[in-house]
Image: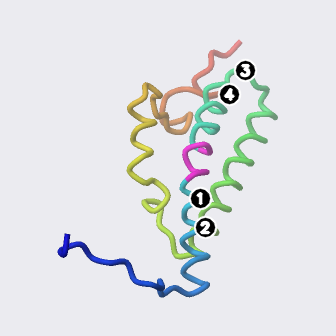
Amino acid sequence: MSELHALPSRIDSDAASVERDLFALVLALVEPIRQLMERQAVRRMDELSDEQVEALGSVLMRRDEAMTELRERYGLSEADLNPPWTDVVSRSGARPRGPATASGRGRSGASAT
């Protein structure tokens, strides 16, 4: 047991690093939920009117801009918000989907009447 390293009696940290790490944790917890909500919205676009699709697109763009601003403010990358445990969600049977235009779904793929 003499090979075990003892924990220091005090951890050196400063307020800025604690704030950044806490914020990274919060965003990492929020990111999978945000992605799930976006997939659900894209999946239901065919049920929306053109105005609702435009409004949804605007909301999603503003949300992405806000997330980018927050990541930049705290010096975080997108990879910082996708910790390894989020792969469990992907393997759980939930199929990741891209934007409606990339997946072939959405208003442009709807049949015209």
Tell me the distance, in whole angstroms, between the alpha carbons under discs 4 and 3: 5 Å
Give the mark, 3 or 1, whose residue is nearer the N terminus: 1
Image quarter of residue 40: top right
Give the mark, 3 or 2, whose residue is nearer the N terminus: 2
Secondary-structure class at tag 3: helix
Majority SS type along the magenta span: helix
Tell me the distance, in whole angstroms, between the alpha carbons under discs 3 and 2: 36 Å
* Residue mark closest to the camera, 4 vs 1: 1
The three-letter amino acid code for the residue at tag 4 is Met
Task: Look at mark 1 in the image and give the residue it sits on.
Answer: 27
* Residue mark closest to the camera, 3 vs 2: 2
Within 10 angstroms of label 3, few (less than 14), some, or many (20 or more) residues? few
- Relative side of 106 to 53, left or right: left
Q: Looking at the figure, which quarter contains the C terminus?
A: top right
Above or below: residue 28 compared with residue 13: above
Residue at the extreme top of the image, as rendered: 113
- How many discs mark residues in the rendered view? 4
Q: Is 15 in front, or is 38?
A: 15
Task: Look at mark 3 in the image and give the residue it sits on.
Answer: 47
Which residue is drawn at the image coordinates 56% and 87% (left, top)? 14
Within 10 angstroms of label 4, few (less than 14), some, or many (20 or more) residues? some
Q: Looking at the figure, which quarter contains the N terminus?
A: bottom left
Secondary-structure class at tag 1: helix
Give the mark, 2 or 4, whose residue is nearer the N terminus: 2
**Residue 29 placement (x, y as % from top left):** 57, 52
The three-letter amino acid code for the residue at tag 3 is Glu
**Residue 32 placement (x, y as % from top left):** 55, 45
Image quarter of residue 55: top right
User: Which label belongs to residue 45?
Assistant: 4
Tell me the distance, in whole angstroms, between the alpha carbons under discs 2 and 4: 32 Å
Which residue is drawn at the image coordinates 46% and 34% (left, top)? 96
User: Which label belongs to residue 23?
Assistant: 2
